[in-house]
Image (cartoon, rainbow, N blue to C red):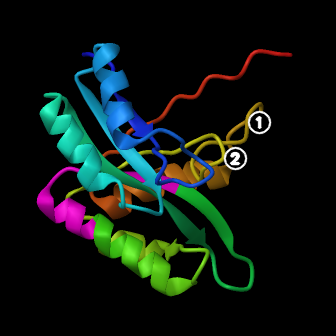
Amino acid sequence: PQYSERHSQSCFSLVYGAALPEALVSRAKELGLHALAITDHDELGGSVRFATAAREAELDGIIGVELTVQIGGDDEPLQTHLPLLAETREGYGNLSTRVTLGRKQARGSPHVSLDQLASHASGVFPLTGCPRGWVAPPAAAAPTEAHRDAAAWLPDNCARPILLECWGRPPAA
């Protein structure tokens, strides 16, 4: 199988991304990738531009979002990031619903609960996320029971397998 990036962020992810969606597509074509996913942070604003550029470049464009998910109650909340990819039109609608729910939750710091995440799972493919995410342990740390529980929660509640993301450790300075 060919490599394709499934977790990239554009300038629509303030602080996290810098490139225009069109530039990401152009670079993916230059690198010979056959597909690219955009997973802007709590945002679908670049999706139309990305999809248009991908179609024009004859690249398989996958629309996704990296949601902020609140684990636990309001007394001791843990907020983490979880990337999700739309596989179908219904999946895109479910991503849109989750982004909207997240923005209604708390103005300025959008997030969804695990219940909201599970209730709109159809047509959506979950990734495990970055090293600071819910599933992956912090760099240089061994997985804990909480990490294993998180990895088990996703396929159980999203009714599908998950895509495990692999992250390299930066070289020592």
Q: Which of 31 and 146 is in front in this view?
A: 31
Which residue is disc 1 drawn over?
141
In the displayed orientation, state which residue is furthest to the right: 173
**Image quadrant where residue 96 sits:** bottom left
User: Residue 66 location in percent, x, y?
Assistant: 46, 55
Q: Quadrant of the C terminus?
A: top right
Whether residue 93 is visible to the viewer of this picture, yes or no, is yes
**Image quadrant where residue 124 sits:** bottom left
Q: Which mark is residue 144?
A: 2
Q: In which quarter of the image is the N terminus?
A: top left
**Image quadrant where residue 100 sits:** bottom left
What residue is shown at x 44% (from left), y 52% (from top)?
A: 40
Q: Are marks 2 and 1 in contact (CB under 8 Å)?
A: yes
What residue is shown at x 72% (from left), y 41% (from top)?
A: 138
The vertical placement of 94 against 23, above or below, is below
98 vs 34, left or right, is right
2 vs 1, front mark: 1
User: Residue 4 location in percent, x, y?
Assistant: 33, 25
Identified by mark 2, the residue type is Thr
Q: What element carries label 1?
A: loop
Q: What stretch is highlighted in magenta?
A: 82-94
The vertical placement of 147 against 167, above or below, is below
What residue is shown at x 33% (from left), y 19% (from top)?
A: 3
Whether residue 160 is visible to the viewer of this picture, yes or no, is no
The vertical placement of 35 against 93, above or below, is above
116 vs 51, left or right, is right
What residue is shown at x 74% (from left), y 85% (from top)?
A: 75
In space, the residues marked 2 and 1 are separated at their CA atoms by 9 Å
Bin the neighbour count of mark 1 within 10 Å (Cα to Cα): few under 14, some 14-19, many 20 and up.
Answer: few
